[in-house]
Image (cartoon, rainbow, N blue to C red):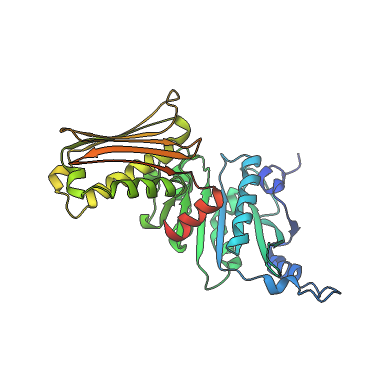
Amino acid sequence: MADTLATEQNEIYRGLPGVEVPVGDALVSLSNMWNAPPASDGARPPSEFRASRMNFILHFGFDASTDEAQALFRSVIQFSRRYPCRVIALCPSRDANAMGQGIVCKIFSECYIGEGQGDMSCCEAIIFGYTLKEKQYLEDQISIFLESDLPTYYWPYRFDSPENLSQYQSFFKNVNRVVLDTSVESYSVDQLTIPERSKLHDLAFARTLSLRQSIGQFFSAFPVECIVDGLTSVVIETPVAYEAEMQCLLVWIQGVLQDCDNCEDESSSTVAYECAAEEQFEYPRLRFAYSNENFADCALKLDCGVAQLNAKIGLSEHSMSGAIKLLDEDDALAEALFFG
């Protein structure tokens, strides 16, 4: 029986766009794609618009479907229109017995014309297919294809277990940031072995930016000592679809309250924090419960983009409505990589 080639069972590698080239020729071939001669009308060649600011490693796990991979790849390419980068996509083969070819690759490039005159950005990607036999060589191979002296970011997507993802220690150690999306992963980030957890940023948290801004603006109307005085619990009730984002929001609230300069350790440590996710809930709702007459209630109606916040804290009552939304993929990625 003939050996199975490395790419034959690698559906994600075959499903992503690009021109297949020998691995050793990938950089030269990619450079040649940009070196088109000037157009007859005097337009500047694409090479003049190619200016990477970073490297972006997109690493698919075995739980990712071909459709998910294609959508995510397009999303990262769209992100690179705003933040030019060299995308490295890594696609492992499911067939552990695949033979031949070793690491294979194809290259992809496109130029995006913006709204303004002369506004153009050029995106490029190198897509690698590999079997688990080549995994031990993968990290050294990939380092050759990174743009030197530029920051590198790593997004592992839908690995089948935290143990398998934790084996790629070189990526965790040698990149500037790692992004994960806990709304789609099947494991907790606490299960990962990561040398520097400060590098890890969650897209689910990044998506809550406007919620955090509205909640922070609302509670800024009250003195900090009044907010924590008599506080017994902070509870978020949410539909299951928003559970990951609301878990992140709750952790943020807990961190803010515990980091307040005016908070006493003993008072903040007695507060209970809970995120309850059930299908029956219409929209996320945030409640602050007190042992005194204080209360705070925040209805986060994401479907219609409105937050309704009401509270009586201390001697003050305050109500506010604000526009909210979960950031889309591009904006959330930028928030996680550069600001979060």
Q: Residue at x 50, y 57 (%)?
A: 334
- Residue 43 image offset from top left, x and y in percent: 79, 74
In this picture, residue 165 sits left or right of residue 10: left
Q: Residue furthest top?
A: 280
Foreground of the two, 20 or 240? 240
Q: Is residue 12 above or below residue 121?
A: above
Query: Is residue 170 among the parts visible in the rendering?
Result: no
Foreground of the two, 255 or 107? 255
In this picture, residue 55 sits left or right of residue 207: right
Q: Residue at x 52, y 73 (%)?
A: 149
- Residue 202 image offset from top left, x and y in percent: 44, 49
- Residue 280 image offset from top left, x and y in percent: 44, 23
User: Residue 199 sits in which quadrant?
Assistant: bottom left
Q: Is residue 286 above or below residue 268?
A: above
- Residue 113 image offset from top left, x and y in percent: 71, 62
Foreground of the two, 237 or 157? 237
Q: Residue at x 60, y 64 (%)?
A: 84
Task: Give the number of marks.
Answer: 0
